[in-house]
Amino acid sequence: IVYSPILARAHRPTSTLLPMLRLSLLLLVGPLDALRVAVTGAGGQTGQHAFRKLLALPEFEPVGIVRSEESKAALVKSGVPADAVTVADVTDEAAIAAALAGCDALIIGTSAKPAPSGETDESTGRPIFGFPNGQPEAVDWLGQKSQIDGAKAAGAIHVVLCSSMGGTDPGNMLNALGRESLPDGSTKGGDILLWKRKAEKYLIDSGVPFTIVHPGGLLNEPGGKRQLVLGVDDERTVGERSIPREDVAEVLVQALRIPAYRGRSFDLRSMNEGEGAVTTDFAALLDELGGRDCDYSLGKMA
């Protein structure tokens, strides 16, 4: 079953239903049939893969949202139409709401990104990481909250969130990145998976139809060459704990096309290339879960 923009729009709030019914008469003629989908993080890696996949599909009218004019210029230089890219910082609530106005769906592809600070932990000899472009609380919690609120205000009928595996384990090493110990024994910063999990639960409780995808370790390798594996709650029975970014992007896009992906939260990994059969049927892939979804009573939220 493939997603129908016309039927999906019928589930919008009443305030937008009548205009959409009038427009539906025009949808049969072509371009207006496209579902307008915002993709945040479109200047990054996984988000950019999703954005480019949507650009290639006539049923979608994607809008790539990037953080800076430099990111927009890079996309345009690569051949992306300038009118398909808009600049808005997800930590600016008003700016992201304006960027999402008129959008029917949203793929959230933003994340705080750790980077070496140049300093070394004297006790371990390991490099100290920070978040130069925004701490997880600002990007993965407040920034994602603003995106969810903006999508809801726009009357969006689906939000697909790209998050991360590891959320059931508060002691996951990723949570220590960027965390600073204070003289009174408390800490500040870091805890990226805890903030991501808080945003996920906010989306679930928002009332907006959702899909939450927790990829394993992201690989910069070609997609479409592996058998993909779904699971829940950081389980790992078969396959690796990693997956190519391009394969993650494909699942984000398929979540918009296949209605059964709505209301689902799951982990996404892959087999090694050459093991198993390459995944091409994404409806059958979802069936592997057997109705299971991630359990948010596990782990911890910020």
Image (cartoon, helix red, strand yellow):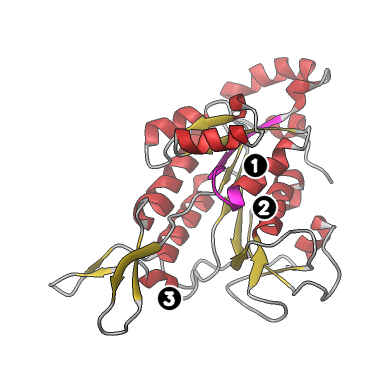
Q: What residue do we see at 67% from left, 33% from top? A: 79
Question: x%, y% of residue 200?
Answer: 50, 56
Magenta-drawn segment: 35-47
The amino acid sitting under disc 1 is: Phe
> For the residue labelled by badge 2, is the local secondary structure a helix, a strand or a loop?
helix
Residue tagged 2: 249
Secondary structure state at the residue bearing disc 3: helix
As drawn, the label of residue 173 is: 3
- Which tag, 3 or 2, sits closer to the chain's start? 3
Q: In whole angstroms, how far apart are the C-alphas of marks 3 and 2? A: 25 Å
> Is residue 146 rendered to the left or right of residue 158?
left
Residue type, label 2: Ala
Q: Earlier in the sequence, mark 2 or mark 1?
A: 1
C-alpha separation, residue under disc 1 versus residue under disc 3? 30 Å
The CA span between labels 2 and 1 is 8 Å
Q: Tag on residue 104?
A: none
- Picture coordinates of residue 174, whole percent (x, y): 43, 70
Furthest toward the left, the residue is 184
Q: Position of residue 295 (x, y in %)?
A: 55, 68
Question: The residue under label 3 is which amino acid type?
Answer: Met
- Which disc number belongs to residue 51? 1
Residue under the image location 71 percent in, 39 percent down:
54
Asked whether residue 300 is drawn in magenta, I would say no
Task: Give the mark nearer the N terminus: 1 vs 3.
Answer: 1
Q: Does residue 260 appear in the picture of this structure?
A: yes
